[in-house]
Image (spheres, coloured by chain):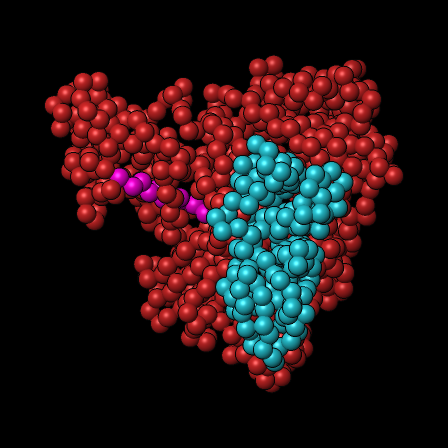
């Protein structure tokens, strides 16, 4: 049944609009957010994607959910992207792998409500019991009556009192769209170049800005001579922004030429900062852990580097700020919070601010932040025209908010069989400067510590102030904690002569989801029949999902190459199987990249790397064969976007250790991390 | 500053830009062809890859002056209906995640297949090694390249 606060209205000419409150999304301010499904008078179906898509496929799943519950084919549903509006939609954040966990039920219910109203309208017209009618392929049918298309029922359905109609969700056993293979709804636009990202936004009179950024961390402009920059053809203005000096011009190349002509001296900051020193400082700050209950069998330390997000589409945002209103086009992971922030920044009523989330060319946590958006706002405000701020790849790599460095010291006590009976994990790292709650070690521990095995022990987190901007990065602290813990467990298994899968099976509850996926992965990868290969295995339980990953590595001229990765994953019902596999495949490539070479270093106060040349994200010739097995379960829908990264990294690193005979000491493996 | 006469996707265009302006900005800003993506500006990612006289090239490191005289095809000009065999294979294999690099991956593949109608894994590695996909769609790209080769040969 519909809740008391549910409502249904006719909008426009006989359109049926289902707008349901989403109690699960209502925040502390008591807002009543809604998600929408709209049927126009001609029967056309429009679904609103409440959260942005940066490649994780949320738009496609939104279409699938609505198509399923409205009993139509996937291509009958058009998807509109919701503008930033936390009043209407509640949280619109894409992060912590929550999108489908939080939006699946309300979207299904909205579409199911529309279907049940259409059925009721048809039954009433025919004078037959509602339960005798069915919705199918865009029609309502009855055994003895002619079928009616949705278009013929929209007006009647919109006039019904929704509280008199029982709403039922389509049972999973009857799904025709969800759980089936389907391509991304934006695929045709992508392969024809029509897909529009933030960087592609075009507006009348649009100017482009690029920002001269500090040559070392924390530097601020001292003396600025912009005469040569202003003399460059096409340059419209030079504007001070938070990070540095923006050159605003009629085109991107003119702005870049103007920036090159800018003469700025910089002051302050940390011109001698060095990430090798930071790493030693972190190691020295490792927190003490409690006394071990027996002799420590193994102790190991792991050192992890800075990582940049490096999405393919560099940071950019377009703003058109007027005296009493503002319009923004932004590849963002959180359009709702952005609107709230801009209302505060500009002193405007949120209703006067339009935030349109564009497609984003990757995000990985970077686009939760707002620094690049505020630059566009500052420029537009200063010049009184719409401005797109564009970050070059160099800007994007050198001025990111990075995954924090970390040092992990793990130790264990074992029994006579070599099985761990106690463990300790001391972590020394930095908070996330862009997410204040992470200044609390307990919050960092909550993000990172998902050790799933039945081994008691202690995890202790020590935080020291971050020397540069740090932020969410796919899997957040679980990427570091999980890596260290699984690498250590593998080292412990080797010490005790354990088969790595057998060891983990012993340490997992017999009926657990994790043990089930571990068995599936081991079976699929023919674990017991491939003992001569260099293999690694790791598990992860997070976001309400469970995964086991097995990696096979070979040496090619002494260089580790990941040949095969097998993953078994339980996300509850896999709504979009191709999308589930894609997220795992993506996490595997992040793991290949970060374990085997990509890292950020700082020398003389500056990030050394500047592009994909020296931040060597893996290419196709380093891509392993990835086999993803979906293990269905009755569990609620789990999160997925980040799940596979920690175990994939650990499994690969452990396999490299087997192949090379050198223990894992950090990330990337066999590299001077700092 | 000069007038440059460019042949792009079968038609002629004139742009007034300094000689050393990267062709990528002329395509994106002056011609409105935003399919070729800005990813790095230094030829290190392949997101802008297009085709000139049958060969894959990087508009971000080609000046407008140097582009004069070439017959240029961007992703927008690859096919009228988006049904080039490579595009069909990409859709069929559900390759894209964010999709930002895919125009470049596709154009590189078109040039590859012109030279190697039945490419080996080594041919694919060689041709696509300089195209970065940050989402990690490489395994699907490999399958789609082989599938496109089949489609181009008229196989089902």
Determine whether A291 is above or below B64 in the image: above
Decide whether residue A337 is among the magenta residues.
Answer: no
Residue at 16%, 36% (x, y): give it.
A156
Nearer to us in this view, A428 or A127: A127
Q: What segment carries the magenta color?
A: A43-53
Chain B rendering hue: cyan
Residue B27 appears in the figure: yes
Give me the residue at 27% from left, 26% from top: A135
| Picture quadrant of residue A434 | bottom right
Left or right relative to A517: residue A632: left
Residue in the foreground of this view, choosing between B39 and A227: B39
Q: Is residue A484 above or below residue A295?
A: below
Q: On the picture, is A539 further left or further right than A354?
A: right
Colour assigned to chain A in the rendering is: red
Q: In the rendered view, would you say B131 is above or below A128?
A: below
Q: Position of residue A343 (x, y in %)?
A: 38, 61
Q: Position of residue A269 (x, y in %)?
A: 67, 67
């Amino acid at each position: 049944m519909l809740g008391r606060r549910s409502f249904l209205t006719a909008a426009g000419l006989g359109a049926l609009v289902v707008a349901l409150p989403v109690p699960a999304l209502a925040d502390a301010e008591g807002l009543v957010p809604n998600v929408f499904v709209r049927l126009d008078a001609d029967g056309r179906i429009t679904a609103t994607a409440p959260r942005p898509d940066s490649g994780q496929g949320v738009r496609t799943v939104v279409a699938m959910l609505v198509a399923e519950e409205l009993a139509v084919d996937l291509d009958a549903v058009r998807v509109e992207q919701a503008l930033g509006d936390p009043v209407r939609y509640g949280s619109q954040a894409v992060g912590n792998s929550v999108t489908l966990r939080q939006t699946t039920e309300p979207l299904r219910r909205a579409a199911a409500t529309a279907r049940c109203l259409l059925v009721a309208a048809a039954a009433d017209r025919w004078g037959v019991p509602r339960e005798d009618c069915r919705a199918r392929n865009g029609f309502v049918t009855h055994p003895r009556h002619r079928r009616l298309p949705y278009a013929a029922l929209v007006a009647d359905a919109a006039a019904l009192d929704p509280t008199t109609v029982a709403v039922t969700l389509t049972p999973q056993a009857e799904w025709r769209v969800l759980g089936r293979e389907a391509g991304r709804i934006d695929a045709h636009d992508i392969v024809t170049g029509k897909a529009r990202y933030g960087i592609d936004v075009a507006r009348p009179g649009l100017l482009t800005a690029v920002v001269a950024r500090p040559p070392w961390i924390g530097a601020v402009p001292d003396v600025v001579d912009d005469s040569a920059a202003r003399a460059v053809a096409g340059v419209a203005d030079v504007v001070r922004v938070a990070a540095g000096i923006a050159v605003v011009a009629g085109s991107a190349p003119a702005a870049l030429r103007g920036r090159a002509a800018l003469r700025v001296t910089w002051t302050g900051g940390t011109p001698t900062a060095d990430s090798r020193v930071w790493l030693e400082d972190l190691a020295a700050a490792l927190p003490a852990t409690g006394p071990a209950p027996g002799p420590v069998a193994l102790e190991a330390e792991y050192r992890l580097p800075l990582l940049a997000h490096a999405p393919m589409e560099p940071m950019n945002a377009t703003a058109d700020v007027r005296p009493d209103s503002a319009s923004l086009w932004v590849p963002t992971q959180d359009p709702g919070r952005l609107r709230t922030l801009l209302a505060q920044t500009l002193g405007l009523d949120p209703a006067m601010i339009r935030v349109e989330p564009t497609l984003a060319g990757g995000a990985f946590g970077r686009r939760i932040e707002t620094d690049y958006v505020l630059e566009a706002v500052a420029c537009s405000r200063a010049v009184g025209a719409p401005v797109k701020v564009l970050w070059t790849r160099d800007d994007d790599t050198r001025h990111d908010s990075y995954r924090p460095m970390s040092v992990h010291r793990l130790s264990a006590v074992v029994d006579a069989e070599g099985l761990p009976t106690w463990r300790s994990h001391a972590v020394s790292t930095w908070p996330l400067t862009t997410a204040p709650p992470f200044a609390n070690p307990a919050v960092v521990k909550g993000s990172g510590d998902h050790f799933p095995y039945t081994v008691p022990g202690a995890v202790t987190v020590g935080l020291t102030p971050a020397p540069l901007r740090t932020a969410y990065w796919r899997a957040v602290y679980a990427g570091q904690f999980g890596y260290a813990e699984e690498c250590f467990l593998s080292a412990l298994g080797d010490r005790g002569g354990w088969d790595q899968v057998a060891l983990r099976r012993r340490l997992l509850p017999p009926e657990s989801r994790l043990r089930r996926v571990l068995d599936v992965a081991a079976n699929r990868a023919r674990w017991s029949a491939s003992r001569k290969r260099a293999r690694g295995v790791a598990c992860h339980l997070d976001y309400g999902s469970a995964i086991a990953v097995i990696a096979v590595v070979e040496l090619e001229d002494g260089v580790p190459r990941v040949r095969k990765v097998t993953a078994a994953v339980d996300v509850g019902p896999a709504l979009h199987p191709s999308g589930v596999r894609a997220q795992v495949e993506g996490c595997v490539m992040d793991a290949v990249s970060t374990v085997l070479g990509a890292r950020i270093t700082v020398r003389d106060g500056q990030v050394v790397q500047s592009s994909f040349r020296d931040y060597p994200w893996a290419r196709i010739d380093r891509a392993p064969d990835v086999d993803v097995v979906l293990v269905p379960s009755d569990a609620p829908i789990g999160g997925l976007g980040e799940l596979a990264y920690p175990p994939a990294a650990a499994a690969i690193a452990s396999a490299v250790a087997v192949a090379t005979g050198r223990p894992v000491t950090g990330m990337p493996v066999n590299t001077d991390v700092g | 500053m000069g007038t440059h006469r460019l042949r792009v996707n079968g038609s002629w265009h004139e742009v007034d830009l300094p000689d050393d302006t990267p062709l990528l900005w002329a395509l994106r800003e002056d011609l409105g062809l935003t399919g070729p993506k800005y990813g790095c500006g230094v030829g290190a990612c392949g997101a802008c890859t297009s085709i000139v006289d049958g060969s894959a090239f990087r508009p971000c490191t080609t000046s407008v002056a140097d582009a004069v005289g070439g017959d240029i095809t961007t992703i927008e000009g690859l096919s009228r209906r988006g049904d080039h065999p490579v595009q069909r294979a990409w859709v069929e294999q559900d390759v894209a995640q964010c999709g930002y690099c895919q125009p470049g991956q596709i154009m590189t593949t078109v040039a590859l297949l012109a030279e190697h109608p039945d490419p080996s894994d080594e041919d694919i590695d060689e041709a696509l090694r300089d195209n970065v996909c940050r989402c990690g769609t490489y395994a699907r790209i490999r399958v789609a390249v082989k599938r496109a080769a089949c489609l181009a040969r008229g196989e089902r």
